[in-house]
Amino acid sequence: MALDLFTPDGCFNPSTPGFTIINSSSTKGSLNNTSSVPPDIIFPVSPLPTLTLGDLTIDHPTADPLRTFKEDKLTTSAPYFDRATEMGFSLLNTAGVFTLFSMSLIGCPGVLDLAFACTLLAAYCAEWSDPLPSTGSHHIQVLLRFEGPFFRAPPPAPNWAQTEWPVLDSSLKAASISPTPRLPTTMCLDVWFKTNLDKITAQLGLHTPVKRVTFRSKPWWTELLSQLRRAYNCALRSSKRDRFDTSLLPSARAARSDYFKAIKKAKRNHWSVFLASATTQTVWRAKKLSLEGPPACFPELPGATTPLELNEALPNHFFPGEPARAIDSILLPLRDCPALTADEVGRALARSSPSLAPGPDKTPNSVWKRIHQVGSHLIHDLLAPVVAHGFHPPALKAADGTRPGKPSYDSPSSFRVIVLLQTFPKILERIMNSRLSCVAHVAGLLNHHQCGSLAGLSAADVTTTLTHEVRTLQMAGSKVSTLFLDIKGGFDNINPATLWNILKVMGVTRYLVLWTTSFLISSKCRLLYQGSRKVFAQVLVGTPQGSPVSPLLFVIYVSHLYCQMPQRLTLSYIDNFGLTASLTSYRRNIQLLQRHYAVVKARGAHLGVSFSIPETEHMHWRICKDRGPISCSPMHLDGWTFSPQGRGPLARVFAHARDLNYPAFHQKTGQSPGCFGGGQGALPRGDGPASRLVPPIGSVTSFSDPQLRRGHL
């Protein structure tokens, strides 16, 4: 009997939507050396994963190696095992474990119930065992357990520590990049780029061995445990083979006890050594390991309870279908594009971490640094044409999306995608990030109140700016309130067409506009979670969070959220905005902040971004000399009511940085007195500033520029 099971998305492989189970019960044929079912029926040629099992009534040394068989039995079983080997089938039975026990005293046990799996299915077999109770038959029940590819060990990865660099260096020096096609189309240039990149990666693969890290690999495993495991398995098989010999059972139990006790001892010793040698980097891993395991990542989302519904809900949530601006089919060299130099490639590689990257290619940056050191012309000649044409090859856009660590996974937002990119496209993205950053400052694409994702402006800058402005306004006698907003989604909401219009209107050079548009469109990402299809989905909106250029593009995209209004100050750190108002009372501050929130919300709707209301906070600033009652006036935004908090997010960052004595924090604050010298002298301590030096109530002082924190006037 043959049973074909079809699954829409593939059970073991997306390319094979189903598998076949062949159940056979064979008897002796008309001749003594034949069976009733021929081998070609049991082991057919099939493109699907195939499982063949049943009582085949054949004896062979492969299934029962400890028994000597007669010539006629070997003649009967040989065609079946030869056919299985020819078709790529593997025996799943544990060698020597009997599946048939005679009901009479004259019979002997045997291995007649066999299970075979083809190459496409054998890799997913996790267990063949007989733990089920007896049914009264002379055949025992066998349990076969298969695990999907998500639960299997990762595929073999290159072992870069054993790369044959002396041999590889000579081949890299002799390698060259083929000439660029004349007047190439987008597809033609992508094929040229992928072909030349594959030449380099093929050379790496030829001279780099692979390694397989299975899910059974443990850092605490020792050779003693391997010996104890072999002794335990040997004793267990002996006790099962001779079930009537009661003297073997105590030795099997003793071997089992010694084996598991040694495992517990090895785990304790490894944990003690790990804690004793913990560093500032590994202490966080120790904390993570000491906590409970991660929460279940197979949730029941609203309207999606089955794996099939989840496969539709999550991609539709993160990758909404919106039209994207298409780039020109024929690419022409752009005259406004400066020629790419080998020094730019070297600087981009110098800023990259040499550690192993988690991308799908598993190629660390140290490999590309070595290639650039040996043959500097390879990476330069490969990237120069795509930069000159303002083109980002689609071959570099396929990536894996993984979930970040969250306390719970009960909503689609908990699966916010962290994109795992290849390391080679990051070289190109760092080069374009440096060029776009220089142009953005000159063209006025960045607001001077933005911090984060920009060179020299960190969380210490925005916190010191905010606290300084608050204290200055409080010394002027005004009441200060701050509303903290968080952009929902952030990088996932960047629309390529909208960003293209922003760059073009602000006068950015054409090749940067074209490259940015090419970088954002036609991206592909596959989500990795329990039950995922592992197929690539088209990404039409957003920019990958793992890209070096994504933070800069996001800051440029949201720069239009700033608007000039009196009696307020707006500071931001990446996707966190702080709106500060200073008037004569906290109630008037709330009214001003509510009006300003409506303006910022309208501008965000035009850009396609919104603010996360549950993450919104607001606070009223006070000084020690305030004798009035503490204000508990709430704020109402979009039907939500927010009570004032004791300390806002930016203020918590400021206190945390100060308490932990961060060197970067004190370096920033140590540079600021030089530019604050005049201000500090004009604002004496104790009695407050003189009236003629106090800025008007509700105004914003000139100290609001975060560049002052860097020691520049």
Image: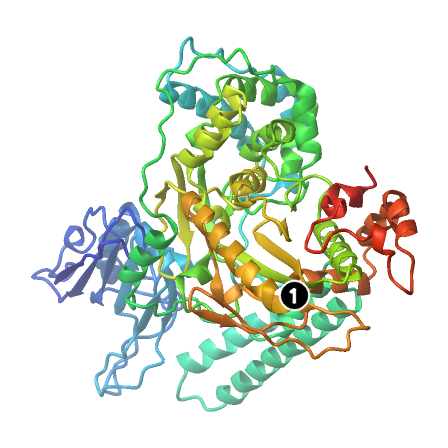
Q: Residue at x 24, y 62 (%)?
A: 73
103 displayed left or right of 265: left
Q: Residue at x 89, y 43 (%)?
A: 674
On the rendered image, what quadrant is the C terminus found in?
A: top right
On the rendered image, what quadrant is the N terminus found in?
A: bottom left
Query: Which colour scheme appears in the figure?
Result: rainbow
**SS assignment at label 1:** loop
**Can you name the residue that lies furthest to the left here?**
30
The residue carrying mark 1 is 648
Q: Residue at x 65, y 46 (%)?
A: 452
**Neighbours of disc 1 within 10 Å: few (<14), some (14-19), many (20+):** many
Residue 643 position in % (x across, y down)? 56, 74
Q: Quadrant of residue 63?
A: bottom left
**Can you name the residue that lies furthest to the top here?**
182
The answer to whether 669 is drawn above or below residue 638 in the figure is above
Residue toward you, 295 or 626: 626
Residue 228 position in % (x across, y down)? 60, 73
426 displayed left or right of 166: left
Q: Is residue 348 visible in the rendered structure shown here?
A: yes
355 displayed left or right of 179: right
Residue toward you, 237 or 332: 332
Q: Is residue 163 visible in the rendered structure shown here?
A: no
Q: Quadrant of residue 213?
A: bottom right
Residue type, mark 1 in image: Gly
Residue 639 position in % (x across, y down)? 42, 68
Residue 300 position in % (x across, y down)? 34, 70
